Image (tube, rainbow, N blue to C red):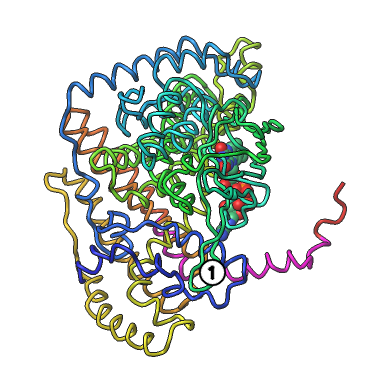
Amino acid sequence: MSQSLLDAPAKTTPAEKDPESVIDMSKMNEGQRAALELTEAARESFDKTSFVADLFMGRWTPQKIAKRLKPDPEKRREEEAFLGKLRDFLANEVDPDLIDRTGEVPDEVMKGLAALGAYGIKVPKNYGGLGLSQTAYCRASEILGSRDGNLFAMLSVHQSVGVPQPLLLFGTEDQKKKYLPRVAGGELSAFALTEQAVGSDPARMITHAEPTEDGANFILNGEKLWCSNGLKAGVMVVAAKTPPKMVKGKPRNQITAFIVDTSSPGVEIGERCRFMGLKALYNGVIRFKNVVVPRENIIDAEGKGLKIALTTLNSGRLSIPAACVGASKRCLQIAREWCTDRIQWGVPIGKHAAIAERMARIASRTFAMESMVLLTARLVDLDKKADIRLEAAMTKMWGTEKYWANIDDLMQIRSGRGYETADSLRARGEKPYPVERMMRDARINTIFEGSSEIMRLFIMREALDPHLKVAGAALNSQVAWSERIKTAVGAGAFYAKWYPGLYFPSGDGIPNLHPRLSAAMEYGSKTARRLARTLFHRMAVEGPALEKRQPLLGRLADIGADLFALAASCIRAQELIDEGQDQDALLDLVDQVAAEARMRISESFNAVGRNADKSGYKLAQDILENRYAWMEEGLV
Ligand SMILES: Cc1cc2nc3c(=O)[nH]c(=O)nc-3n(C[C@H](O)[C@H](O)[C@H](O)COP(=O)(O)OP(=O)(O)OC[C@H]3O[C@@H](n4cnc5c(N)ncnc54)[C@H](O)[C@@H]3O)c2cc1C
């Protein structure tokens, strides 16, 4: 395989300059085309491929996620001191059932968190924050997630997508000086992208900002939906359409991110939105009526709004799976206690294999998701500019889905008592395990900050990128024949070298791994090559239609995520063994992670060839045509 080809794509990809050169958009309708153009233009590109990107090309490069940080005892002490105080505060000053019951976060809790510095964990000290690492931020999210979903969501929206993170990445010095001390000190911030017609598709955005004649200000108009923290925020990042840019003689939509003070005339805080869980999220509709926003409040530059949102979310969305780790640890604790205490049919229920299996799965998934979070966070701490797009997207997708599986398993273990509210259990004198509340709070995780479907699309778009670069133009009916033939010849040469390599071991291992961990990694290496072959075969069979085979692509994304979970677990287990933790217990845990991953991976590979995708899609289209209206007859 040509390593240089994989590792050193052009800094500006052809797709970035002109997505139409590698993706055939000729058969798309206007809406599909607009959505794709916008997201393609917002794609980032990097000089080097990441571990996950390599997986899809059949290269097993776990050393890329195994790099360790140089120890910094002073920093470590600061982090531990903050995390300890946060833990104590949540344990002693916060009543999650009260917050859930009333739908309000008490003022003293808000103030207490601000006093701890929890509003500006990553904000550098010179801007009034704690100046802690991404890892510390993820560990704080884990602690919050183990105790209260509302407080986690509030602080995560504030720091991951609200004002701090975009300003840290893209802000001017003036913007940082003006806003970071405010938000780090306890002024809540928010992020407003979603609208009535804009969920996963920002191309449909209506909120717009027009420059004033002198160009000094923009006039913002529109309405945003489901803006978390919006009811309490002093400042928010607002995404709005700005006048289109001309590309190849055609207007192309532009989205720009503005910092908006909520005290500005014309900002109206509308209805509060209420949800099945996260009862105390201060989420609502925000309206902008002729709001004057100074040009200097643009983050980065005009038209960079979506790129900012995507880049911010790379490390930002890690906080959600980190919170899922904390909540999953709580699941494990409750499962262990209840499986020990509850006797049915003469033994504790943990002795019944059907229940024991559920508890084992909670433990293995929790270890794997924590490993994915911590290794990815460490990549950010090693290099703030590291390409963690795929690792973060997979961690979000895998972690949130596996936490949902964990809470579902715990619900079954707790059974009737799982379904009963904590208040009701308490009133009857039983231990008030909050499984019912945790389940309600958990469901949103696979939806916000990039739904699971969008994560799979994103992962597979990046997985296909090397192929699009090599061969995309050859299959594109919009490209001139001479260019198509030239690309086809180049692609032929590339694949003649790359493809045979997929049948032989490649990539590097990790030195000094325990043999049981090495065996799991060996399986990972072999399976990565199979994954790359399968993706290539499907490309050959489906051609450009592959893009439409979402369930199939989703299975390949899932295989990649399981391989990442496995590699991360092996690496972290070895690190913990090296630190003196119980070796046998760790190896048993990773064996379980590996066994479950192998089962899922084998199922996914089998379903690549044998599935119900096409018949299911046809059935769904027939349902849309109302051919099955009779199935809905008799509804009340
Ligand atoms: C509690 C809560 C808090 C939120 N906080 C904020 C916030 O602070 N700021 C903010 O801007 N937004 C916020 N949101 C919005 C949230 O990010 C969106 O709900 C999310 O982006 C999905 O949009 P949607 O619900 O409109 O679903 P849609 O985009 O309408 O999608 C519906 C379904 O179709 C799938 N889908 C969509 N497009 C595709 C495709 N191309 N291929 C395959 N599947 C697809 C989706 O995955 C989803 O399952 C919040 C939402 C909730 C419920």
Of residues 174 and 116, the one nearer the viewer is: 174
Q: Residue furthest left?
A: 512
Residue at 28% across, 60% down: 54
Q: SS for tag 1?
A: helix
Instruction: Answer left or right for 433 relative to 81.
Output: right
Measured along the vertical axis of the image, is residue 32 above or below residue 499? above
Q: Relative to residue 541, is residue 33 depicted above or below?
A: above
Q: Tell me the residue at 59%/71% (across/down).
A: 614
Decide if residue 395 is on the left or right side of residue 422: left
Q: Residue at x 32, y 86 (%)?
A: 486
Above/below status of 180 relative to 259: above
Up the image or down, 623 lies above or below 189; here it is below
Indicate the quadrant where residue 105 lies: top right
Tag 1 residue: 548
Which residue appears farthest toward the front when viewing the image?
A: 214
Please tell me whether the stretch drawn in magenta is mainly helix, strand or loop.
helix
The answer to whether any part of residue 275 appears in the image is no
Residue 225 x/y as whole percent: 65, 41
Q: How far across and how far down the image is residue 279, in percent?
A: 63, 27
Q: Quadrant of residue 115?
A: top left
Give the x, y percent position of residue 322: 40, 34
The one of 2 and 291 positioned closer to us in this rendering: 291
Q: Position of residue 599 (x, y in %)?
A: 40, 53
**Quarter of the view holding residue 60:** bottom left
Is residue 620 magenta-colored? yes
In the rendered structure, which amino acid carries the disc numbered 1?
Lys
Which segment is the magenta one?
A: 601-630
